[in-house]
Image (cartoon, rainbow, N blue to C red):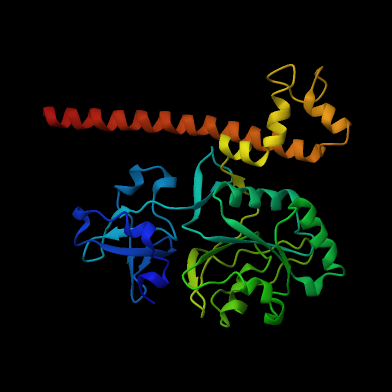
Amino acid sequence: MGLTGLGWNPFFAAQLRPEDDGLVPLRITAVHRTGHVLSDGERECEIHLGRFWFRHPAEERPTVGDWVLTDAARTRIERCLSRYSVLQRVAAGSQGEVQLIGANVDKLFVVTSCNAEFSAPRLKRYLALAASEDIDPLIVLTKADLAADPLAYRGQAAEAAPGLPIEVVNALDGATLDGVREWLRSGRTIALLGSSGVGKSTLLNTLAGDELQVTRPIREQDAKGRHTTTHRSLNPLPDGTLVLDGPGVRELGVVIGERDLDEFYDDVEALAARCRYSNCRHQTEPDCAVRAEIEAGRLDPQRVRDYQALAAEGQRQQTHAADRRRRAGRLERTRRSGLRCDGDD
């Protein structure tokens, strides 16, 4: 396969410096509890992250899909090359801690199923994540063979994501995957994103023509799946496409920036700027331009609710990030103080 088959391109080659002579470029193809698996397209090695990397915020540590430079013996990661895209989420139950899903992703398959698991709000969050990194998404609706009316789910997805491509498939039947296969390209990295049990691993196995991931049935009573994929990994398909699969994500806390709100909800933002009060909640305040558009039937109230939810989440994330920076600053000052004291002895 070689480096090119793993996705190496001029973007990464341009980052090599004269002082990197002797270092080895490798791509992280899997992340386990025991270490990171790296490959040059011909052979693999496993490396544990050293203490140096754990001084960095979680979002700056190497993850699956990253290109890194190692020492000649391939025992230590010296540098992580800049990414052109990164999928990340706010870890469930954390104080805004960021968890990386994968790096250097070219396309995203948002996988959901034609049953009780389907959720339009969750689908919108997945798509917001793709849009935040300028990654083209394909919505893949699985389990069409088990649904009484799979086209009804297609209609709901089209309403939640107007204009985006949608494929309705039976992930066990390769004959239904022609539309999905059109997205496959040698050297391209495609990430699968969706809840447990929606058929991500089944889709991967059918595309590969082999059982790359273990699959298990969903719970019949609520259509929720069980985590069968326990780590994130890049899986090569016979045509050379690299598919990033990992544990299902049901609760997706999207990392929201001000630019994202400007891009996703520029119409709502422009209307909000015309409200009488700068902190208008668009509920009962007088001279509310947003509410006036809703009442006139020119603005979907659900779009406003989605905007407000993301804006509130973005504010929480900024607060948590500021708290993390303060904690990290205190720890670093304490560490340096200790070093100075040691030097005085």
Which residue is outermost to the left? 345
Q: Quadrant of the C terminus?
A: top left
Image spot of residue 211 (x, y percent): 56, 80
Report the number of numbered marks.
0
Q: Work out whether 99 lies above or below 270.
A: below
Front residue of 125/188: it is: 188
Image spot of residue 202 (x, y percent): 63, 74
Front residue of 53/267: it is: 267
- Residue at x 38% of width, y 70% of height: 4
Q: Quadrant of residue 191?
A: bottom right
Image spot of residue 224 (x, y percent): 72, 61
- Residue at x 68% of width, y 38% of height: 265
**Relative to 266, 186 lies left or right:** left
Front residue of 18/193: it is: 18
Q: Quadrant of the N terminus?
A: bottom left
Q: Work out whether 328 lies above or below 42.
A: above
**Relative to 116, 215 lies left or right:** left
**Relative to 275, 209 lies left or right:** left
Front residue of 138/233: it is: 138
Image spot of residue 68 (x, y percent): 33, 58
> Is any atom of residue 324 visible in this view?
yes
> Is any atom of residue 67 visible in this view?
no
